Image: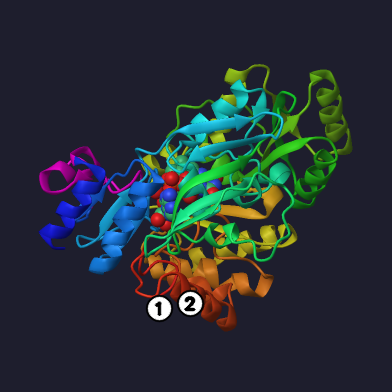
Amino acid sequence: MSDSLLDEIAAVVGAAGLLTGSALAGRSAGIWSGEALRAKALVRPCSTAEVAAVMRLCHAAGQSVIPVGGMTGLAGAHESGPDDVVLSTERMQRIESIDVDGRSMTVEAGAILQQVQDAAADAGLYFALDLGARASCTIGGNIATNAGGVRVLRYGMMREQLLGVEVVLADGSVLSSMFNLLKNNTGYDLRQFFVGSEGTLGVVTRAVLRLHEAPPPVQTALLAVPEWSRVMSLLRYFDTGGLAACEVMWRNDYELNTGDFSDIEPPLTTAAPYYLLIDVFAADRDEFEDRLAACFERGDVVDGVLALSEAERQALWRIREDFEPEQRCFERVFGYDISLPIQRMEEVVETLGRELRKRDAGAEVFAYGHIGDGNLHYSIYPGSLSRDEVDALVYRPLAAVSGSVSAEHGIGIEKKAWLHCTRNTAEIELMRRVKRMFDPDNLLNPGKLFDL
Ligand SMILES: Cc1cc2nc3c(=O)[nH]c(=O)nc-3n(C[C@H](O)[C@H](O)[C@H](O)COP(=O)(O)OP(=O)(O)OC[C@H]3O[C@@H](n4cnc5c(N)ncnc54)[C@H](O)[C@@H]3O)c2cc1C
């Protein structure tokens, strides 16, 4: 990159908005990476106008640009190389307005998810996206990855929370589509191009978010379940009455997260093949307890515990969300995010475990996930197996069960080689044509999702 381009960018964003050389040294490449950020420059604009001006300059200079938010992505989609300009929305965190009657909120793309949730709550409303990275991830990143999380079952993914969007395209032009309407059937739904586009089609700068009425308090229970068919019937049973989250952990995952490598005492000591963590919106705890009692009577549940305070609720959720025990226990763990029909999950996980052990007796799969959305996560201790070998064992069987190689984390660079397991040739070719239309010079997040 020429010095003159840097000078021109500095003239747009000011000295505080452009970090290069030694100023980049302390910056990390992301929450999981532990490595330093690799980039020619980190640009931190303050407004849509500044993003547009930066993009115009980069476009004219043929400069690649990697948009980033909280850098919590799990598919490598925010990764950059030494010749890239990284464009961060970290100075665009404003919550601009809340429309209580219209139940919407207008924010800048760098707004942190948790701040958005809190602002909605302060206004007596509810923003329905929620995920473990809430304290770091941004609305722009949530849009670009079509984030899912723990409330999808009740409210849908980020796609469903988005009413309007403002985006700067690769050539610096601004597309403003900041509608505040639930119903708007006026041709192509342009905002949806950017949902899940992983920064390859435009830089999201602002958004109008859908809010909901605040739900009743959440009741949380952890249940030990004796068989898979009962996991499915419990899901259906609670879904008839305010189910807000339904997370499953296979036994070895529950035991790892409450065992020697964890500081969490196991709240249930009864061994069972599955543990179900459920959140139900219910003002009346007694009524929820009665529903739980009915599950015991039917034999759907062999043990269970109900959270009696917010602290107890968070402690139960930590069992599901804590990744530290696996990192303490194993020197290498591979993470996966897939989706498949719920009826096939038991068999798919069993087969995977068998296939892993056939190749290395020590290898092990820990399965857990947002069961109500058909979304499974694996943490796999691979033993002596390579990443490619394990990837093949995880992804290849998915086509046969109409599953997806990515439920909610996206494709990034990590899953590029496996996109064809879920999307057919015609779909991938049309995606390439869309990319060429938005960004003919392939300057925005090049090499992510697929190669052109
Ligand atoms: C502990 C933990 C738990 C998680 N749980 C979940 C979960 O339950 N569900 C889930 O879906 N994800 C989860 N994630 C993954 C991650 O938090 C989400 O993918 C999140 O949406 C990424 O947001 P971000 O701001 O960190 O984006 P980044 O990681 O910075 O970027 C991700 C992608 O979005 C693009 N991007 C970022 N900002 C913009 C923008 N303004 N315009 C255009 N493109 C942009 C980047 O180029 C990149 O392609 C989790 C991550 C962690 C660390």
Q: Quadrant of the N terminus?
A: bottom left
Residue 422 image point, x, y percent: 58, 72
Which residue corresponds to mark 2?
Answer: 432
Residue 367 appears in the figure: no
Judge by depth and name the residue closer to the eye, 1 or 380. Answer: 1
Which residue corresponds to mark 1?
Answer: 452
Residue 373 appears in the figure: yes
- For residue 403, the mark is none
Name which quarter of the figure residue 425 lies in: bottom right
Residue 103 image point, x, y percent: 68, 34
Say which amino acid is labelled 1: Leu
**Left or right of residue 276, residue 9 in this image:** left
For the residues labelled 2 and 1, the Cα–Cα distance comes to 6 Å
Please report the bounds of the magenta region as a residue range. 15-37
Residue 279 image point, x, y percent: 70, 33
**Left or right of residue 319, residue 187 in this image:** right
